[in-house]
Amino acid sequence: MPACVPARAAEPNPTERAHSPHSPPPTGARRFRIAGADVSASIAVFLIALPLSLGIALATGAPLQAGLVAAAVGGLVAGRIGGSPLQVSGPAAGLTVVTADLIQRYGWRATCAITILAGLAQLGLGCLRVARGALAVSPAIVHGMLAGIGVTIAVAQLHIVLGGTPLSSVPDNLRALPAQLAHTRPAAVSVSVLTLALLLLWPRLPGPTGRLLRKVPAALVAVAGATAAAALTGLHLPKVDLPSWSNHALAGLPEGSALGLVAAVLTITLVCSVQSLLGAVAVDKLVARREGASTQVGRSDLDRELLGQGAANIVSGSLGGLPIAGVAVRSSANVNAGAVSRNSTMLHGVLVVFATLLLVPVLELIPLASLAALVMAVGIQMVSLNHIRTVTRHREVWVYAVTTLGVVCLGVLQGVALGIATAVGVALHRLTRTRITHEEREGVHHVHVRGQLTFLAVPRLSRALHLVPHGADTVVELDGSFMDHAAYETLQDWQKTHTARGGTVEITGRHPGTRISEPQASTGCRCRPWTPWRNHQCERPQSAPHSESNPDGSERGESDPTGTSGASGHELARGISAFQRNTAPLVRSELARLAREGQRPSQLFLTCADSRLVTSMITSSGPGDLFVVRNVGNLVPRPGEESGDDSVSAAIEYAVDVLRVRSITVCGHSGCGAMQALLGSEPGSTRTPLERWLRHGLPSLERIRNDSVPWGGLAGREAEDAVEQLCLTNVVQQLEHLRAHESVARALTKGTLELHGMYFHVGEAEAYLLTDADGEHVFDRVWEADLTA
């Protein structure tokens, strides 16, 4: 053993200080390594990018080499500098219409210069750190913009598929379509049909062999198959023509009106930035959903991504390439292929460079009709039925439709502007659509406000309030989620005047901030009615002499200087005392009635034992309303399983057969510790009581791993992480377990029982109800569903 050197014997040099004293000294320079997953992912992305880049260049009317330049620069520059490690950038179908319009208006060299200026604008936006602001654009506008671009691409490429040449706009192309159909070229149509057939059928190959073959991208198979068929049959068709790099056109100074050039730069900047940023967010969700990844991939830095896209556009424009943006198809392929770092994106760019230099004779065999069919299919896919269902469910179909039609008929920038104007108009309409009614029931005047209460509704509110006679008992129901300061003051002033004249006012509402009618306590207590849910004790204005406060806010005196003995019991006693003093007088008569008549709950509410889930609070229920069953993970053991605990089955049978409840609700919640434990559990582990109980949640775990079975999802956004996805899916799975119980199945057959799924997000204080639309289990916000009812 070597002797230990005393710490003070010598001062290590900086190189030695950088290494652990227990590790051997470095033997040489650190070797650069690329993970095998990145290599395989880069090949998969390259095989998709190569035909798509050529097809998009063909659709824009740019030199075909411009698509390859943009693909290479997108991989190398945006891949190295960008903030989304796994997003793949390059020529995007969403930029096809914009680029084609610029080429026709200003020429190719001027379009390259506009691309450079757009890149500079992106760099400026990235330095200003405004990337998050782009995500504030309504998804209906973004989806509508992409759908409009998709329609434009599909209609234009249809002419090439039929053997003709597209015109400059969608209306012109539609008017020219009958004449084009009359002069169809059979050779072009046959190659295009073969390409589309391979695109459609290749991902559906059955069996183990099909599963192996499906690893080859369908786009590559379609173009390669059509090319081979055209070559073997000797069809004479226009093919890819890659001119010599010595004749490749580079950027030149644009000519035209300054206003038109500014609009062109803004359009490229807008479309590139929004598509790239939304793509980065989508990639983060794909990475979070991916299972079994041994290497953690960091979340996207959106400002850095904007800088990377700007730098890539500057380089691409300077080298005579197409505008660049994040591409959804290639990015999803990169993630699904198992990429773990930005090396896969950069390596795909290197492969594009090699193909451009070495595979020119092969690329020049590809028929243009095959590339046109490929791009037409991409355009059709941009009109997503799932997006249409989503915007329809959120009542934004008008925004989507106006944006789509605007892009198709007028252009991208004009269509987006129309979409933004429509979105603002819809928001103002919703804000002003407030219904205020007044009615008298059993001597009590009810003023019901449905919708958002803003200054625009103050005149109608005042008219309704003045219909209430002096001295009358009044209930004001605020059935909305927002009330501004003008409405607040109007309501508060009327309340003070009405109570001063002998009347009573009770104001109820959904949002805690709208409860403005609570009287000030005369005892000096500053608690509001909702503070007990925060686990607070009443805070007095002045503590007793020589007393201190515990960390939880409760007082401790000199008799217990540590504040540890009996703290929980003291808090419990204070809570009971507060109930006897404040709440018991209000509920005593109701509890006496329930004691005489017995319980008659209308619902069985099965939820988790988590202490943050207060069933009476989130359901606005009281004594006798709910028959509550709580357990770890809100699990429902399937009948016939040996669980060692029949309490849940017994409660279900008692609630359905004896109490005859009309509905059963399974309620999950965010941050469920049981679901976290289930995700981290070892297969077959049943050593502890908790592990034995959690095995009833294993079907939920299997469900999220089975793509053929519908999960549970939140409306408007994806699940935050795997735990939330499991929490949502567990509710859906436990409802299926519930249907297997004999008493439940019998009541469902008779139509006397309903089943509901519910999810409560603790951090947002937001409740969601399960809906089943088109076979998809979706949790929608309860208050939104109620407002639209």
Image: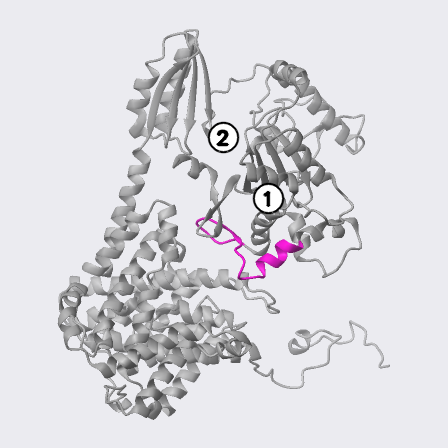
Label 1 sits on a secondary structure element that is: strand
* Residue name at image x 23 percent, y 51 percent: 418
Q: Quadrant of the rendered structure where residue 358 is? A: bottom left
Residue 9 numbered tag: none
Location of the N terminus by quadrant is bottom right
Three-letter code, disc 1: Gly
Any part of residue 606 in sight: yes
- What residue would you read off at disc 1? 668
Residue 491 sits above or below residue 171 on the image? above
Horizontally, residue 578 falls left or right of residue 462, namely right
* Residue name at image x 27 percent, y 52 percent: 401
Compare residues 587 and 106 and report the one nearer the observer.
Answer: 587
* Residue name at image x 70 percent, y 22 percent: 576
Q: Quadrant of the rendered structure where residue 371 is? A: bottom left
Label 2 sits on a secondary structure element that is: helix
Q: Judge whether residue 705 is colored magenta.
A: yes
Compare residues 751 and 600 and report the one nearer the observer.
Answer: 751
Compare residues 339 and 394 and report the one nearer the observer.
Answer: 394
- Magenta span of residues: 698-720
x%, y% of residue 754? 54, 37
Would you call the spot at circle 1 few (<14 residues within 10 Å), some (14-19), or many (20 or more)? many
Residue 400 sits above or below residue 520 on the image? below
Compare residues 438 and 657 and report the one nearer the observer.
Answer: 657
- What residue would you read off at disc 2? 512
x%, y% of residue 746? 61, 39
Three-letter code, disc 2: Pro
Location of the C terminus by quadrant is top left
* Residue name at image x 36 percent, y 50 percent: 391
Q: CA distance from mark 2 to mark 1?
A: 23 Å
